[in-house]
Image (cartoon, rainbow, N blue to C red):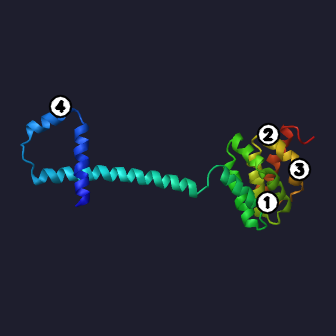
Amino acid sequence: MMMRKLAAQFNTYLSRTKSPHLNQSRNFSSSKTTTKDDITTIEEDAERKIGWLLKLMFAGTATFIGYQFFPYMGDNLVQQSVSLLQVKDPFFKRTGASRLARFAISDEKRMKVVELGGAQELVHMLEDAKDENTRIAALKALAALSYSDEAVGALHNAGAISVIKSTPDSPEEAEIKNYKSSLLKRFQELRYDS
């Protein structure tokens, strides 16, 4: 009952803000007595408008809360991914490297990875890798970073060339050889391999 009364008041307010011609023509065309059907129609219209307003407020609140409590985008993602590279478990290292490879899609983002220590950690990860899957994840992330000239310079400073050259090839995994050759070729293009 309270909602219906509030809806009726809200509808009255909304109908007053419309242009005066519409209200006059409405008053002339309808009788002075208001029927129960008219009141029900007005209440339903107001409830619908308030419902949409509440839905929009809920969506805005949910978006704000989601952005605050689920920091899986931007700098937080890179920081978390670099932190995962420092864990001893190879699964977490692969997860961090995979995230960095997906994040490094522009020069700006690649340099963000380098600034947060991601390049150095990936080189350490590749150097310490005991299994092929970890090597592949590290090489893939290094290859993603290598599209930026500045990032290649940071990889060179981190000692990536010697680590990449010393990474063993795998007869089962051609990916390792492909990533190694593309990275070494990139170093040669920028004259870091001399």
Q: Which mark is residue 159?
A: 3
Comes first in the chain, label 1 or label 4:
4
Comes first in the chain, label 2 or label 1:
1
Task: Find residue 92 and report its horizontal and vertical position in percent.
Answer: 72, 64
Task: Find residue 110 and report its horizontal and vertical position in percent.
Answer: 73, 45
The answer to whether residue 190 is left or right of residue 108 is right
Asked if disc 3 and disc 2 are in contact, CB closer than 8 Å, the reply is no
Mark 2: few, some, or many residues within 10 Å (few <14, many ≥20)? some
Q: Where 136 falls versus 156 (above or below)?
A: below
Q: Where 62 falls versus 189 (above or below)?
A: below
Q: Is residue 172 visible?
A: no
Q: Nearer the viewer, residue 169 or 64?
A: 64
Secondary structure found at label 3:
loop
Comes first in the chain, label 4 or label 3:
4
Q: Residue at x 17, y 54 (%)?
A: 40
Q: Which mark is residue 119?
A: none
- Give the residue type that dot 2 points to: Glu
Secondary structure found at label 4:
helix
Residue picked out by circle 4: 21
In three-dimensional space, the C-alpha distance between marks 1 and 4, rounded to whole angstroms, equals 75 Å
* Residue 30 lies in quadrant: top left
Q: Which mark is residue 135?
A: 1
Q: Residue at x 22, y 51 (%)?
A: 8
Task: Find residue 52 and report its horizontal and vertical position in percent.
Answer: 34, 50
- Give the position of the N terminus as an image quadrant: bottom left
The answer to whether residue 129 is left or right of residue 30 is right
